[in-house]
Image: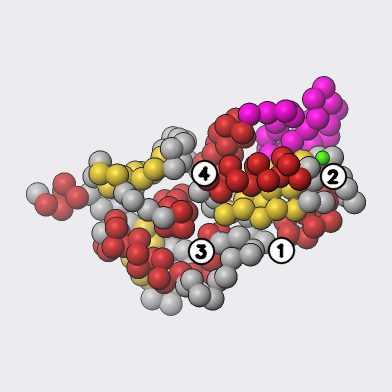
Amino acid sequence: MRILLVEDDPDLSRQLKRALADAGYAVDHAGDGEEASFLGETEPYDAIVLDLGLPKIDGAAVLEGWRRAQIATPVLILTARGAWSEKVAGFDAGADDYLTKPFHTEELLARLRALLRRSAGHAAPSLSCGDLRLDPRAARATVAGEPLRLTSLEYRLLHYLMMHQGRVISRTELVEHLYDQDFDRDSNTIEVFVGRLRKKIGPERVETVRGLGYRLVAVDGEARRA
Ligand code: CA
């Protein structure tokens, strides 16, 4: 899952970037409205955290621009305390949720999880596919009840596949949603990560659809053995 964080305060940006990365997301950061507008229109994010008070172009105008360009990515806006009219403007511009500053990082992460879940059409907070389970609240995954030891990139890959299970996902789509913009994509091909994930969760769970990409399929270990 890849997130765009738009915030001009350097301290808050650093803190949020770290918290988002620790929670398992690939994170790009924009420090002003112009950069935010460009990144949001050119990169396929899974969700965007958008401060409304920004240099160059204000957040509500950036958001309006995205929505006019038919970009439907869920957006959580950050507003100043007491500025209720900002919230109204934000929702009118196309926001999906908001948080008032100052806020607890935990609340931001919880709201993001809810946004991501709803935008992918999932009702329950944890994801399952056969006997594979993933809980974004704890950034943990298990197979047949056994905890999986995954690197952050393997976790991100599994999270994305589980969010979109049953659907064929191309390598390009995976690259776009797993890596942040600074990541050296050439030396870290998706095939390698899919191979490593397969070893950990069982190769039969990630189908290769020739020429198209990968699909996560439900496998029940108990049923298979019986
Ligand atoms: Ca600001």
Q: Nearer the viewer, residue 13 or 45?
A: 13
- Is-magenta flag for residue 69? no
Residue that sits furthest to the top in the current view: 82
**What residue sits right under mark 1 in the picture?**
42
The earlier-in-sequence mark between 2 and 3 is 2
**Mark 3 nearby-residue class (10 Å; few <14, some 14–19, many ≥20):** some
Q: Which residues are magenta?
A: 76-104
Q: Nearer the viewer, residue 158 or 217?
A: 158
**Mark 2 nearby-residue class (10 Å; few <14, some 14–19, many ≥20):** many
Q: Amino acid at mark 4?
A: Ala
Q: Amino acid at mark 3?
A: Leu
Q: Amino acid at mark 1?
A: Thr
Give the number of the disc on residue 114. none
Residue 17's place in the image compared with 182, above or below, is above
The answer to whether marks 3 and 4 mark residues whose Cβ atoms lie closer than 8 Å is no
**What residue sits right under mark 3 in the picture?**
174
Is label 1 in a helix, a strand or a loop? Answer: helix
**What residue sits right under mark 4 in the picture?**
23
The answer to whether marks 2 and 1 mark residues whose Cβ atoms lie closer than 8 Å is no
The earlier-in-sequence mark between 2 and 4 is 4
**Residue 204 placed where, x, y %?**
26, 62
Quarter, ligand 1: top right
Alpha-carbon span between mark 2 and mark 4: 25 Å
Give the number of the disc on residue 54. 2
Residue that sits furthest to the left in the current view: 226
- Residue 52 falls in which quadrant of the image? top right
